[in-house]
Image (spheres, rainbow, N blue to C red):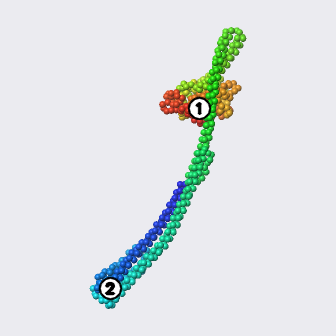
Amino acid sequence: MSLKRKFLLQNMLLALGLLLVAGVSLWRLRALREEVAASRYAYTELKTAETTLVHIARAQGLLAAPDANRPELVQNLRDAVDGLNDFIRPDKAYVNDPAAAKAYESLVRYGERGRQRLTMVLRAVEADKPIPSGTPDHHALVAAADGALWDVDAMVRGCTTYIRDKQDEASSRLNTESILLAGLSAAAVVAALLITASQYRSVVVPLQRLRRGVRSVAAAKFSERLDPAGPAEFAELATEFNRMAEELDDFYRRLEEKVRSTSQELVRSERLASVGFLAAGVAHEINNPLNVITGYAELTMKRLRALDGDPAADDAAKSLQIIRDEAFRCKQTTEKLLSLARGGSDAREPLSLAEVAQEVALMTRGLKNYRDREVKLNFDDAASLRVVANPGEMKQVLLNLTINALQAVPPGTGQVRIEGRRKADWVEVTVSDNGRGIPPESLKHVFEPFFTDKRGASEPGTGLGLSITHAIVESHGGRICAESGGVGLGSRFTVMLPAGNGEHDDGGGGNGGPNGPGPTANSRPPLQREPMG
């Protein structure tokens, strides 16, 4: 049962219990009120009977000399008759009470008999006929007044008895009602305590369990899970909490992986910078003697060529040609080292990477060693692939990646794809091939200086091309990464650079124009990678 329905049912039961207590209390109070009303009417009748009794007693005293006290005697007799008429009137409210009606019946008989006697006395007194004392008529009137007095006295005693019985009955009923109401109230209190305890277990206990789970997550213990027990709402909340913990655990693991990857990149960048600083000095020192060697080699070759027909001179010229060519190769290597140390030029301008890729594709088609291998281009709108960069360096980056891919694919069936797309504030260019791939143990070292897996190949590398490419991309505030499914499954290199804002860019390294700031040099492109096709 859900917590909402449980609370609703419990509160409805508690409300019904309170309504029951209130209903019983009002019902019993109404009965007590009727008892009190009956007693009040009986008390009123008692007062009437007592007043009538007083008037009869006065009339009885005045009958000792009726002729002398006739006016006062008549008034007392009339008051007594009126009191009896009021007492025996049939429209009394308390007559609705069966007990009161039964008592009233006996008292009415006394009242009617007393009224008859007093009426007879009143008629005799009102008839202006003398009533001498001691005569039979006088004795008859006195006897009638005495009888009426005893009748009214019986009425008074009957009212007193009825009121006393009602009081005793009300007291007994009050005790019973008090016990009943006390029991109902105690039952309501117990029910309220049980409902409170049930709601406490339904709410506070799951909340405490949830609090412990939150504390474990705050302590980076993402592997702990909550038991989805209890009411439906808390079970659902525990399920959502477990899902959040799983997502946080996955995010934490991915974050650790990103930190580890970034740390490796920093180490590689520091190593590259150190090697570049050292290589700059070495290359500068080597360039000077290489210039001297190539100069003297060319001068000597000119002199030897002037000696036509001398076989020894021709052999010497060929040797000098080899010396000069190898010296130029050494010079090219030192120039690469110098470009690695310089870290790129600051002369940057808005350009389209799609146009740069087209130029690189045209250049590679003219290389005779790679004419039997296909280069395909697939770009979005060229306007959306604009960046702020050094044109020569961008051409060098794509040329290095494309030539490496052409060297990795087999003749005839080899295929290299250069693709570009816009992703939010970044421009992404990928160079992929279906060649020999990169072993997993070599993949993490591809951007390190002097590292190459083409030792002994027909076209061995120096291990500087990808290092220089990495340095150029990093200097432009971008990022480059290498992916491969393994040996024989091809490879893919992805370059991400901050997108430019077209003609409004000011060459500030991708910081954007007046339309809003673009990605800064310190920002990093997203790390998500699509799986290799």
- Quarter in which the N terminus is drawn: bottom right
- Image-based side of 156 in relation to 398, left or right: left
Q: Residue at x 30, y 88 (%)?
A: 131
Marking on residue 63: 2
Marking on residue 479: 1
Which amino acid, mark 2? Leu
Work out whether 19 lies above or below 366.
below
- Quarter in which the C terminus is drawn: top right
Task: Find residue 382 and report its image quarter.
Answer: top right
Q: How many marks?
A: 2
Spot the residue most to the left: 128
The mark closer to the camera, 1 or 2, is: 2
Answer whether residue 323 is visible to the viewer in this image.
yes
Marking on residue 254: none
* Foreground of the two, 418 or 36: 36
* Foreground of the two, 408 or 482: 482
The image position of residue 265, as x and y in percent, is 62, 33
The image position of residue 5, as x and y in percent, is 53, 56
The image position of residue 152, as x and y in percent, is 38, 81
Q: Residue at x 65, y 20 (%)?
A: 286
- Image-based side of 413 in relation to 504, left or right: right
Mark 1 lies on a secondary structure that is strand
Answer whether residue 102 is visible to the viewer in this image.
no
Mark 2 lies on a secondary structure that is loop
Work out whether 34 lies above or below 523.
below
Measure the alpha-carbon separation of dots 1 and 2.
Answer: 138 Å
Spot the residue most to the bottom: 135
Q: Residues within 10 Å of mark 2 (few under 14, many from 20)?
A: many
Task: Find residue 324 and report its image quarter.
Answer: top right
* Foreground of the two, 476 or 312: 476
Which amino acid, mark 1? Arg
